[in-house]
Image (cartoon, rainbow, N blue to C red):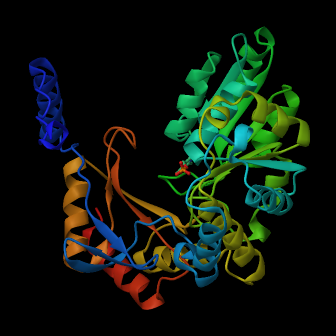
Amino acid sequence: MNQHRPRQASPPAESLERFAAEKLAALEAQHLRRRLEETARADGVQVVRGGRPMISFSCNDYLNLSNHPAVVAAAKAALDKYGAGAGASRLVTGNHPLYAELEGKLARMKRTEAACVFGSGYLANIGIVPALMGEGDLIVLDELGHACMHAGARLARATVMLFPHNDIETAGALLAEHRPRHRHCLILTETVFSMDGDRAPIAGLARLAAAHDAWLMTDDAHGFGVLPASERDDYDMVPLKMGTLSKAVGVYGGYLCASRAVVELVENRARSFIYTTGLPPPAVAAASAALDAIENTPGLAGAPLAKARLFTDRAGLAPAQSSVVPVVLGAAERALEASRALADQGFLVVAIRPPTVPENTARLRIAFSAGHEDADVIRLAEAVRAILPN
Ligand SMILES: *Cc1c(COP(=O)(O)O)cnc(C)c1O
């Protein structure tokens, strides 16, 4: 009776509504307001947005594994066997049998003793950094490091110093000056930078780390599966290999590959590992099957880089260093216009604006996947050439 009556909406708090409306209006005025656009992805390439079929160059599913038949089948089988959710934190009862297999594969592929899987890459970074660093410690971080590296560094309550992007010399000067006054030191960078597509000087940073007794951690979100093994020799010099299962692996989750002791310490201390529910079994099974596909398909890892190089060659740009090619246009409005112009030709290339990238560097971020047809890559290169600043 009473409980079947439709409930009254809660009354809006006037100051709250005003706050939200004013903030949104300010973003709108700067061309920085973002909106969720419904996007149906049939694979990593063909999408439908606003009723319009488009070819996406904005997905991080670099190997198109999110829809790979073996990956989907593994998810379905896990769903039938273990259900839709983990039921608890991994340290309680959420550590279902699929985790050991996934972590074993990750450790093997990354050539470390052990691995631990987090709920996402974001959760991994905000958990690992404070698990290793605290007050009295020093974190030296590339200024273009991902938002979750900055968040992890803040949560650690350590001294945080940023060095200019990929500038080993300045990083070295910071270490020389500040390292002696701190107990432990962590150097943080990405292997491949998410918005610029360039690579970190890993070997140089590893040498700095050795010289200053610092620990080097890299975020491999855009390197794994994208760069061929032949271009990753320096990666073995990194003791803390963090990454995500949400990009080239095509599913969801994050990880740290490191020594057994470090992994066990992180499992004991990382709050975003301890106080959150385990991943759904289908996600873990799917990621595991995706790793098999990467290992067992010759030439798959590295294919996105080849597509990106075809693009930069045809567009007259410097050779791509990864699957991500930025076209920096400056003002947010210009990036939005360029994105709309490409949309009119059937290409989905999302404009990336501050605060995701620094002020006045709004850009098109073009992401290539193994599944792109060469003909489409070439057509896009011609379309981009036409809008490039001269
Ligand atoms: C996407 C990304 C993350 C976050 O990974 P998720 O699994 O999506 O949470 C972390 N670091 C970098 C560099 C990324 O690009």
The percent position of residue 77, horizontal first and vertical second, equals 64, 74
Q: Is residue 179 above or below residue 112?
A: above
Q: Viewed as shown, does residue 230 lie left or right of 315? A: right
The percent position of residue 92, horizontal first and vertical second, equals 71, 38
The percent position of residue 145, horizontal first and vertical second, equals 56, 40
Q: Viewed as shown, does residue 310 lie left or right of 74? A: left
Q: Residue at x 23, y 43 (%)?
A: 32
Q: Residue at x 65, y 68 (%)?
A: 78
* Residue 191 visible somewhere in the drawing: no
- Work out which residue is located at the far front of the displayed protein and give it: 1
* Residue 190 visible somewhere in the drawing: yes
Who is closer to the viewer here, 75 or 31?
A: 75
Who is closer to the viewer here, 222 or 379?
A: 222
Q: Residue at x 58, y 40 (%)?
A: 123
User: Which quarter of the figure is the N terminus placed in?
Assistant: top left
Q: Is residue 287 above or below residue 336?
A: below
The percent position of residue 195, horizontal first and vertical second, equals 47, 52
| Residue 176, image quadrant | top right
Who is closer to the viewer here, 92 or 304?
A: 92
